Image (spheres, rainbow, N blue to C red):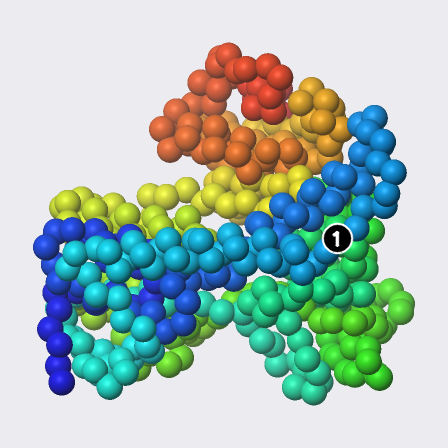
Amino acid sequence: MREHYDAIVIGTGQSGPALAVRLAGTGRKTAIIERKLVGGTCVNTGCIPTKTLIASARAAYVARRGGDYGLIIDAPIGVDMARVKARKDEVVRKSNEGVTQWLQGTSNLTLIEGHARFESVKSVRVNGRVLEADSIFINVGGRATVPDMPGLADIPYLTNSSMMAVDFLPEHLVIVGGSYIGLEFAQMYRRFGSRVTVIEMGPRLIAREDEEISTAIQQILEAEGIEFRLNAKCVAVKREGNRIVAQASCDQAPHEIAGSHLLLAVGRVPNTDDLGLDKAGIATDERGFIAVDDQLRTNVPGIWALGDVNGRGAFTHTSYNDYEIVADNLLEGDTRRVGDRIVAYALFIDPPLGRAGMTERDVRAAGRAALVGRMPMTRVGRARERGETQGMMKMLIDAETKRILGAAILGIDGDEVIHSILDVMYADAPYTVIRRAMHIHPTVTELIPTLVSDLKPLV
């Protein structure tokens, strides 16, 4: 049986549902297919559940610091992990059901549960049904990388997805991977009460960031008792009794770390290995990401790839922006491009890191003459009032055009403050616009004009 649609959307991550609803709203008969959980990674195993867990972890952290603020807490602060998980599950449930009901309640739109695989350029098979359409949009996301690590097949391990089922407190959580996902889980579980050790193959954490930012983040996390093993060039794991032992060839001893549980946080891979892409002639790169142009079109006319699966962004906000680009170009005659957007993301440790644009390394690699402004969070009144003065602010300015090249805000509300800078960058306005602005006191953002009033040449 063949069913004919005007458009087919494969996957219900951040791009898929909004695009499907918008297509259906124009009168197009649309099908959206989901093989597992409606809402994709963000709703079910990513942003929403992890940030809900982070909120619980922060509440425990602040409660333990009550004495610093003059509070009297007679009993020790404990964490009921079953209740923590139940709270997370409820937040996720509401989000999942909200997206599901939105899709099911939209006219001209059919939600189909099952695994879609391409049959040809214009058709996909799901649950024995063959669906045909002139326009097909792929939004299947990615999953945690499971590395080819010696001994891994013989022991139990966790990923960011399976961590969502944990309702107990690991005695000693060993995390392989010192980047964004690994560090968020590290701080979260340390604040819940676990001992935490992070193993990183590189010489420093989150190598994408400037060294001073990376160093500051490590210092913040070490101050909370998180242990780090860097330069772990060769990692292997084994079981000894009821313990999991990670072997790391590192510069410093000991060379083995014994823990109760192992979390792998070493990256993500696209869900493209079981889509039948070859039957449609859809090209992928060497890592399995679907190759797309600047308007997210694949090499096959009538097929687009959005979200994590295209390798053009790895965040919920980049996925949603993919939807906006495709929808506006297709339905409004616009000419939006991926290349027009500015890199922006956050690391949701506490305090968070907000990032926009180029790093210092990027600027140097590009050979740009630049100015730089730096400020420790100890100078920010709002940070002192809250007793949270860790971190720093940094901004890079093009010395000739006076445009902002990039910024990093590592400190309280850094994930929010960064948008005041990002918006000026999108406006293509000089940094002097911020320098002359009057901001509200006492806030973190009020120090941004001060930051750009004391710029030095980047040498």
As drawn, 401 above or below 131: above
- Residue type indicated by callout 1: Val
Q: Can residue 345 be seen in this view?
A: yes
Query: Percent from the top left, x then y, of residue 192?
Result: 74, 53
Query: Percent from the top left, x then y, of residue 238?
Result: 77, 83
- Circle 1 crowding by C-alpha within 10 Å: few under 14, some 14–19, many from 20: some
In terms of secondary structure, where does tag 1 sit?
A: loop
The residue carrying mark 1 is: 79
**Residue drawn where x is 37% and y is 43% of the image:** 341
**Residue drawn where x is 12% and y is 51% of the image:** 26
As drawn, 35 above or below 83: below
Q: Can residue 369 be seen in this view?
A: no
Q: In which quarter of the image is residue 81?
A: bottom right
Image side of residue 430 versus residue 105, left or right: right
Q: Say which of 118 and 451 sits in front.
A: 118
Q: Say which of 299 and 133 sits in front.
A: 133
Query: Percent from the top left, x then y, of residue 314?
Result: 46, 57
Q: In which quarter of the image is the N terminus?
A: bottom left
Number of labels in the image equals 1
Q: Quadrant of the C terminus?
A: top right
Image side of residue 125 versus residue 405, left or right: left
Q: In which quarter of the image is residue 24?
A: bottom left
